[in-house]
Image (tube, coloured by chain):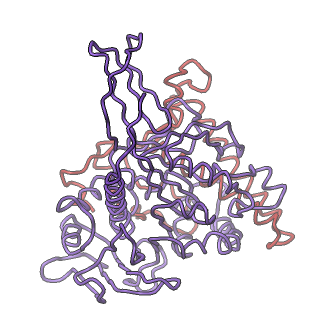
Chain colours: A purple, B red
Amino acid sequence: MAVCSAYTIQSLNSTKTHLGFHQKQVILYTPTKKQSTITCSVSDKTVVIGLAADSGCGKSTFMRRLTSVFGGAAEPPRGGNPDSNTLISDTTTVICLDDYHSLDRTGRKEKGVTALDPKSNDFDLMYVQVKALKEGVAVEKPIYNHVTGLLDPPELIKPPKILVIEGLHPMYDARVRDLLDFSIYLDISNEVKFAWKIQRDMAERGHSLESIKASIEARKPDFDAYIDPQKQYADAVMEVLPTQLIPGDNEGKVLRVKLIMKEGMKYFSPVYLFDEGSTITWIPCGRKLTCSYPGIKFSYGPDTYYSHEVSVLEMDGQFDRLDELIYVESHLSNISTKFYGEVTQQMLKHADFPGSNNGTGLFQTIIGLKIRDLYEQLIASKAATPLQATKA
Amino acid sequence: MASLITASLIQTRSGSVDGLKASGGWMGKEKAKVVGVKAATTMGGGGGGRGGAKYKGTQMREKKLTKMIEEKVKEAKQVCEGDERSDECKVAWDEVEEVSQAKAHLRLKLLHKQDPLESFCQDNPDTDECLIYED
């Protein structure tokens, strides 16, 4: 978003059009007969979103859906370190918080700390850089190389419209927390985590059920001590649990997904079913809609979460057909779509992503739309305050 | 998911229905049984033609990560024999998780034909890393 004012200045002796980034300004130098230049000031602030997840950075499905809602695919920075964890699209930059490791793999081994331990992360640097980006200043951010386990030379990150910081500790440090305009915590239950890691790692020669289990168990104490408590600060928590529709199911195929949304936020109104603030259980399958086993079950209602008011929307089961998805979408309220069927369209666009037929995909998509809505509201409120016109 | 997939709004990278057929949600691959089977599947489904490394540098990274997983699992088992609750044991399994994640991410990228060296190799086609790897 930019507000541009035209000024007449001396033309530069140049045959090319230059685009320069200088802090908050985009300056266009073009030799024209009129000798005029357009100076644009980008919005004073970048919108910052925090995403806490234990699945590595920037490649998670949540990120891909989120960047897709804003348009365009997020790609690694061109021409830079091929092991960069950063993703950049037209509107969004996604930063991996592993880049703020203060200890590389060797260092962590020497000191006996895991990557989950705050001691292996430089929160001062994280704070300084996120703050700078939020204020429209580019930063040279370190790169943590997951292949070599080393800290590589930094890469230049320019302030985007939307900055997403993703990783294990986006809400750990209070100063960083205060910079976040919206935060999400992805809470995967132990059974589902186990099932997903089996799916992920069983193809690897080195792994077996035992090693996958041992890895989860060994990391659990640090996870519970340092990562899990961040839940209480999140504006939205997405909890992924095994289904209750199939007795004794432990394969993690059918999922029960809960979207726990904070109440009372200025630019975020929780999604609801039928009647806001009431308690609803809804099984859409019946006369108008035929579903295949195990079907779909929704519930919605108010609750308290870590002593603040929340609304909880829950989906158990799977979508099997397009019309089920449309039907469900048409009964949800406050989903911040710009047109009827937008959620369905987004889901179809990425039908190959994991979770496209269940609550994870649905809620991730809805959160993406709500973040878009939050972004637009924030920008509109800032546009209400006059921007300073600056001379080139 | 078949009818969902054939809806006209869908665009897929591979352009094939095959790629989507088995991608119904997380556990789209019915053949991914848990016990005792090394599933030849990868995250996110995708049936038609497994993605492979395009450049030599990526192929080497793949091999390196595979080897590291094996080594670090072995190492973790050894380290934890003494005391399962020791810091060394935690760190050892954390390393296993880190490299497993890295490998999985690489696999996913390759499945979507996004070789991480793509832009580097377009700018530096003559480096050793950028030799095109023919499967």
Vertical order, B15 against A330 (above or below):
above
- Which of the 4 image quarters holds residue A157? top right
Q: Position of residue A91 (x, y in %)?
A: 38, 45
At a point 22% along the width and 82% down the height, the residue shown is: A274
Q: Position of residue A14 (x, y in %)?
A: 41, 11
Which part of the image, by quadrant, shows the N terminus of chain A?
Answer: top left
Vertical order, A299 against B70 (above or below):
below
Vertical order, A364 against A85 (above or below):
below
At a point 54% along the width and 49% down the height, the residue shown is: A95
Left or right, A255 with respect to A231, comes to left
Left or right, A12 with respect to A369, comes to right
Query: Is B129 or A48 nearer to us in this picture?
Result: A48
Figure label count: 0
Q: Residue furthest left?
A: A288
At a point 48% along the width and 65% down the height, the residue shown is: A183
Q: Position of residue A86 (x, y in %)?
A: 53, 44
| Residue A168 visible within the image | no
Which part of the image, by quadrant, shows the C terminus of chain A?
Answer: top left
| Residue A199 visible within the image | yes
At a point 56% along the width and 32% down the height, the residue shown is: A80
Q: Position of residue A302 (x, y in %)?
A: 37, 86
